Image (cartoon, rainbow, N blue to C red):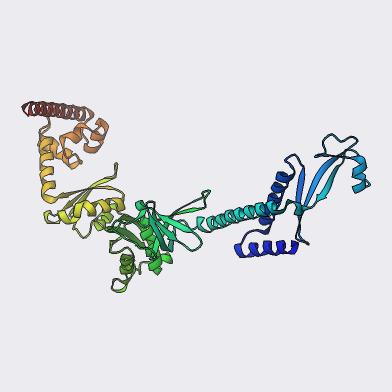
């Protein structure tokens, strides 16, 4: 029986990959618990495992005393010397007990503890295996669908693809294969929870890394990615080798590489854009297929005005604003698209507003316009030092122009407020 226990321990350890010492510790805990249940909690017990015989040994420790007052914890010197002739009063004597006397309780308890330790150990192993796979693409099989999301069988464990990480209009059925991005691995009492995503921009990045050898080798780099999952995506690429076209490498021969990714994403359109350190050039590429006439940058608040031919406006903005929205996310700047006619009109209106500032003539208006001030409002909102530096005007002249612009804008705001009140009253 003892050799049988040793064989079971070795078999479970080998097949489940659980440390043998962990199993032995679980059995010892179970026997100790069963012994205290049967003999009382006050007993001082020590449980050991004999590696050679495979035997669980239980020792009850009692203090050697002249007069026994607590038979559970004490033993007389006379009785103690029958067990160990050399013991003295005050010694702690270990008395070996018959572990088989705990019978079925010990066996059942040991089984429960071993099963629990096995589950804990398996959970720990799964967590250790998957915690470093965060940020990778993983393959699985759809096991079931419920209100929490899609439960994906990964083999040794399950993962969850929540509704928030699912691509709109993608439908999966039980038994179907699925690829997804490992978004997070959480350690929980019930076991590790592996959260998957098919909407994360990094899922697209990882697909390109898997499909394009030049990216895996580090020759081509992905510089940015913006997605509206299931609909459209833009990805910016650059090459470390002047002989390698980054866009061509990602597209592949006859579009084979990008088509494989589009197929995986079930028809999501992908724009591959050459990255540039010049933000205006990068934005121009990001807004493709629309043509761009000019770009006015505001580096201070990272925004830009993009001027396009009148017939290119709808193309630049895209369906429901998608093209400009994705381009803005990819570049990391706010993008405002205007037509050439609207821009020319705003320039004209701005110039006229400069001329309407009291004390500003045509020469000064031209000076302000050339310095980058496109309206009276911009002049009113600037500082004297900035205006002096930009235009070369004297401090006194700059201060008077700003004061005049502020007064003019104040009157305009007051008139607009009055008109609004009158309109409300009429309504």
Q: Is residue 205 visible?
A: yes
**Residue placed most toward the observer, 201 or 18:** 18
Residue drawn at x 15%, y 53% as measured from the top left: 313
Residue drawn at x 72%, y 45% as measured from the top left: 38
Horizontally, is 109 left or right of 259 in the view?
Answer: right
Horizontally, is 354 left or right of 82 in the view?
Answer: left
Give the answer, above or below, for where 299 lies relative to 282.
above
Split into 4 quadrants, where in the image is the C terminus?
A: top left
Give the answer, above or below, for where 421 lies relative to 344.
above
Q: Position of residue 358 (x, y in %)?
A: 11, 29
Residue drawn at x 38%, y 68% as measured from the top left: 211
Give the answer, above or below, for where 14 lies relative to 304.
below
Q: Position of residue 217 (x, y in %)?
A: 43, 67
Q: Is residue 297 visible?
A: no
**Residue placed most toward the observer, 404 or 32:** 32
**Residue placed most toward the observer, 169 or 80:** 80
């Amino acid at each position: 029986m003892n050799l049988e226990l040793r064989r079971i321990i070795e078999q479970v350890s080998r097949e489940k990959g659980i440390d043998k010492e962990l199993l032995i510790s679980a059995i010892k805990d179970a026997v100790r618990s069963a012994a205290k249940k049967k003999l009382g909690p006050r007993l001082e017990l020590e449980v050991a495992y004999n590696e050679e015989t495979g035997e669980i040994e239980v020792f009850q420790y009692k203090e050697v005393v002249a007069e026994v007052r607590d038979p559970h914890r004490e033993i007389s010197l006379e009785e103690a010397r029958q067990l160990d002739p050399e013991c003295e009063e005050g010694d702690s004597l270990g008395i070996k007990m018959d572990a088989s006397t705990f019978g079925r309780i010990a066996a059942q308890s040991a089984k429960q503890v071993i099963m629990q330790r096995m589950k804990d150990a398996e959970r720990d192993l799964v967590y250790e295996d998957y915690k470093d796979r965060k940020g990778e693409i993983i393959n699985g099989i759809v096991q079931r669908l419920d209100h929490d999301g899609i439960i994906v069988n990964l083999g040794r464990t399950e993962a969850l693809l929540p509704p928030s990480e699912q691509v709109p209009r993608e439908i999966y059925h039980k038994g179907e294969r699925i690829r997804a991005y490992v978004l997070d691995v959480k350690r929980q009492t019930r076991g590790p929870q592996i959260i998957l995503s098919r909407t994360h921009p990094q899922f697209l990045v990882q697909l390109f890394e898997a499909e394009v050898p030049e990216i895996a080798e580090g020759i081509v780099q992905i510089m940015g990615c913006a997605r509206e999952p299931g609909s459209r995506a833009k990805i910016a690429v650059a090459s470390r080798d002047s002989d390698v076209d980054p866009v061509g490498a990602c597209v592949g021969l006859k579009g084979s590489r990008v088509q494989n990714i589009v197929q995986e994403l079930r028809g999501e359109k992908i724009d591959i854009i050459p990255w540039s350190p010049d933000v205006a050039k990068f934005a121009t590429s990001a807004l493709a297929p629309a043509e761009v006439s000019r770009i006015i940058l505001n580096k201070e608040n990272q925004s830009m005005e993009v001027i396009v031919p009148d017939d290119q406006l709808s193309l630049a903005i895209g369906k429901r604003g998608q093209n400009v929205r994705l381009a803005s996310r990819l570049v990391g700047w706010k993008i405002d698209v205007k037509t050439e006619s609207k821009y020319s009109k705003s320039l004209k209106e701005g110039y006229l507003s400069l001329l309407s500032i009291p004390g500003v003539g045509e020469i000064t208006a031209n000076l302000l316009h050339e310095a980058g001030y496109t309206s009276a409002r911009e002049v009113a909102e600037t500082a004297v030092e900035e205006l002096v530096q930009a235009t070369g005007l004297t401090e006194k002249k700059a201060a008077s122009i700003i004061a005049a612009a502020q007064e003019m804008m104040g009157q305009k705001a007051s008139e607009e407020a009055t008109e609004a009140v009158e309109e409300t009253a009429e309504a």
